Image (spheres, rainbow, N blue to C red):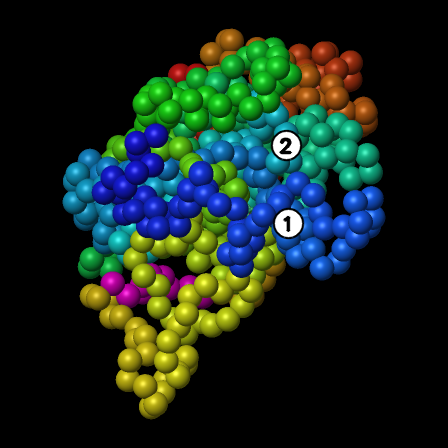
Amino acid sequence: SDKRKVDGNSKNEQLEKFRVDDQDKKMTTNQGLRISEDEFSLKAGERGPTLMEDFHFREKITHFDHERIPERVVHARGYSAHGEFELYESMKEYTRAKFLQEPGSKTPVFVRFSTVAGSKGSGELARDVRGFATKFYTEEGNYDLVGNNMPVFFIQDAIKFPDLIHAVKPEQHNEIPQAASAHDTFWDFVANNQETAHMIMWHMSDRAIPRSFRMMEGFGVHTFRFVNEEGKGYFVKFHWKPKLGVHSVVWDEAQKINGKNPDFHRADLYESIDNGDYPEFELGVQIIDETDENMFNFDILDPTKIWPEEDVPVRIIGKMTLNRNVDNVFAENEQVAFHPGHIVPGIDFTNDPLLQGRLFSYTDTQLIRLGGPNFHELPINRSVCPFHNNQRGGYGRQTINKGQVSYHNNSLANNTPSVSSEEEGGYVHYQEKVEGRKIRARSDSFKDHFSQAVLFWNSMSDAERDHIISAFSFELGMCKSQSVQQQAVNMFANVNLEMAQEIAANLGVTLPESGGSNITKCSPALSQENTVNLPDT
Ligand code: HEM
């Protein structure tokens, strides 16, 4: 489409330098040698064996043999598009991030939507969380907002992530069933790790079967930090709100679509962009002043909690428009490397223990997935501003760094890269005061696992509640272990007794008689009557 041509978008201009048009060209080897024959290997005699000296055959087969790279350990199935982010309102008061200063300013973006649990070839209408990862190519370097379509997460500490994913992925002994939420290990993990309660309510809701990538919300999930020019910090949560509204399919539709067209979501995204119906998402922020950190009856650093929008309104500050399809799915969708640790001045982390662990995991996995330490040089991952440092070598290195010296400090060269002051755009970490004993523990303020799950249930319409009960009954119904089913039903009696009883009756297990027995701590302010506003689904 025309959008692929250079259009003033700095990332698109950069990518143009890497695009190659093979149409109507003479075929060559990778060394540039023209090829005279591509159908027959070189043989000793017409009916004889293929000769080792057939370099064209060897090169062609070798390259093919190495075409695959490992799929992502999670979020393997995904689809992407390019676009731009336009700022409506300056965030200068809260952050020095350059791309959030001038209303009207535009920043190129690349977004990858994904499912979490399925393999690269799995169906797109699975009941699952959806990834919503955005790379902003800012003048100050890449900023990645690596979010999901649900505002909370299953666990509170990154050390449990491998356990969660081992429980969610197909069971190791036979991979039957493969569906993320329809087997014993998944529900066994849930019932024995009750911090999952709130997320599971979202997961059993219609949010887990979106109608389209264009009709999903996105959430940064964690509490991040904005830091302004004066060095003052604010807690911030990020939201994407689709201009088309939030829409889901019902389970029966999901199953039929998955059977007939497992590519339904990617086709919807690709075709809508191709037709000029550009998907749009508004960016919202919730901001809490640092002095209000302890004003809430939950811990604002707990990733299993939302900040109720009634208490902390979402401010809409800009809009992202996806207006260009990828040229090549491997080069863009597969090679892109998102990382919640890719940040710019004015944005910083908090002590959310899930976020802290993510900061390690992404580069680590990409080192193996993308074959060594130079994946930042892949076209899709390159920042639009240049990068300079003393890192050298490694598999796949493309940059040719000139000069004798590649270290700091030195006396032999006066032109090696030097560091920048804060005023010059040098990144300075927020000087949060931290002290404490080294312990493996979790703060008591993280121990309420049910209050917001109750809020979620209370906020649902009757139809949505029916869907949740059906989803629990279907997914738990796939479990072989009655004990696991019973544990799960008992756990969700803490969210709503009638809901749990109905699920138990559908499953044929013992009806729980009371809820609340295994609630670790329930905030008194969050009673069964409280609700929270969610966009209509
Ligand atoms: C992908 C780890 C939690 C969103 C990944 C990948 C890993 C990972 C290893 C594959 C990356 C790659 O191969 O390039 C973790 C760990 C977590 C965690 C250790 C918790 C401790 C989360 C949370 C969110 C999230 C809370 C959402 C807020 C994503 C997304 C992707 C992803 C969207 C796909 C990125 C893409 O499209 O390429 N995660 N993750 N993850 N993660 Fe996480």
185 shown above or below 230: above
State the residue in front, 370 or 145: 370
In the displayed image of the protein, which residue is found farthest to the front? 45
Q: Earlier in the sequence, mark 1 or mark 2?
A: 1
In the displayed image of the protein, which residue is found farthest to the top? 463
Which residue is depicted at the point 44% across and 58% down? 377
From mark 1 to mark 2, how far is it between C-alphas? 25 Å
Which amino acid, mark 2?
A: Gly
Left or right side of 302 for 122 = right
Left or right side of 347 for 112 = right
141 shown above or below 446: below
Spot occupied by residue 465 in the image (x, y as percentages of width and height): 54, 13
How many other residues sit within 10 Å of disc 1, few (<14), some (14-19) or many (≥20)? few
State the residue in front, 5 or 424: 5
Which residue is depicted at the point 54% across and 68% down? 394
Residue 121 - label: 2
Q: Quadrant of the N terminus?
A: top left
Question: Which quadrant of the view contains residue 434?
Answer: bottom left
Spot occupied by residue 421 in the image (x, y as percentages of width and height): 24, 70
Which amino acid, mark 1?
A: Lys
Spot occupied by residue 163 in the image (x, y as percentages of width and height): 68, 45
Which residue is depicted at the point 25% across and 39% down? 7
Residue 432 - label: none
Asked if residue 474 shows in the view, the reply is: yes
Left or right side of 209 for 184 = right
> What range of the chain is rendered magenta?
425-435
Ligand 1 closer than 8 Å to label 2 CB: no
Ligand 1 closer than 8 Å to label 1 CB: no
Q: Which residue position is annotated with label 1?
A: 60
In the displayed image of the protein, which residue is found farthest to the bottom? 411
Q: Quadrant of the C terminus?
A: top left
Which residue is depicted at the point 36% across and 47% down? 15
